[in-house]
Image (spheres, rainbow, N blue to C red):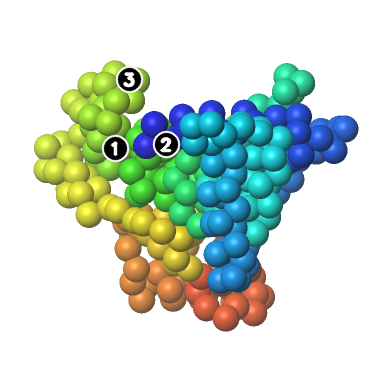
Amino acid sequence: MRRAAGRLQAAALVLLAVVVLGGCSALHGDVAVPTARPAPAESQDRARAASLFRDAQRTLNPPRGGTRDPDRAAALFEQAARLGHPEAQVLVALAHLSRGDGRRDTAAAIPWLNLAAHEGEAEAQFLLGRLLEAGDGTPRDTAWAALWFHRAAERGHPEAGFAMAMLQVAGEGTARDWPEALARFRLAERRGVGAARRYREALAPRVPPAEARQGAALLAGESARGAVPAVDRPLRRFAQSALARRGRWDAAVDGRDSPRLRAALDAFARDERIVAASPFDPLVIDRLRRPG
């Protein structure tokens, strides 16, 4: 995962001060990270985007005897991103986060990260969580940050798992869960996150062995690949945490589906006078994101 992120960072450098950023004369203000899922790219656009991405890679790293053309590569990466290629979207976002003039246009990066994150790019999910947690380029929203950290962690991103554990320890943005946080620290430590050991050693004596085993068992089955589904464990956990903050949920915050959770969401929608198509309708989730 770290090697993949490094490759993305290196390729993003070719986008600096060229086609993607050439027209940016001023930095943007804060932008909100939307709740609703973006519309997926059309199948023909995806095929074209994949072809453009491959062309960009070859242009950036041509075979022996070829001529490297960073400007053309940047243009191809941008076209691929606009047609829905998730990895190209991450590259464009990273370019905005590493501008050649020494500034960062975080707000310009966020829409690209949001698109790629919904397509299952773990690095985009992690970066989006970081920006939300810090309120960098977008209003601070630790609950939505936790959701994206959780999704990236499910896809094997070590730093995202560590970030999620930190929020679970503090009960910030998500319900406090020391057993699961301990399991996340252990996993992050095994995957090379240096700070994880110190936090694991500090937390371990505070978690009873039986609870620690339960937390580890829950994480053992945590995995995800590909695009984010309409409803997943991170979204259910977000809903449980948000309902609990409002005194509407007194059961475990574990991200598991249940008739009780759906009934609680339906009741919340009725009380808020939201006409919802389903318990996890974006209108309901968007209202839960607001301070309650």
Earlier along the polypeptide chain: callout 2 or callout 1?
2
The amino acid marked with disc number 1 is Arg
Q: Which residue is mark 2?
A: 4
Element at label 2: helix
Q: CA distance from mark 2 to mark 1?
A: 21 Å
Mark 1 surroundings within 10 Å by alpha-carbon count, few (fewer than 14), some (14 through 19), many (20 or more): many
From where the camera sits, is residue 257 visible? yes
Crowdedness of circle 2 by 10 Å Cα count: few (<14), some, many (20+)? Answer: few
* Quadrant housing residue 277: bottom right
Residue 245 image label? none
Find the residue positioned furthest to the left. Answer: 210
Q: Mark 1 highlights which residue?
A: 184
Distance between mark 1 and mark 3 Cα atoms: 13 Å
Label count reads: 3
Residue 120 place in picture, x, y as percent: 46, 54
| Residue displayed at 29% across by 18% down | 198
Task: Please name which of the two marks, 2 or 1, marks the residue nearer to the observer.
Answer: 2
In the picture, residue 2 is in which quadrant?
A: top left
Q: Secondary structure at mark 1?
A: helix
Q: Pinpoint residue 78: horizontal percent, then vertical percent.
A: 68, 47
* SS label for mark 3: loop
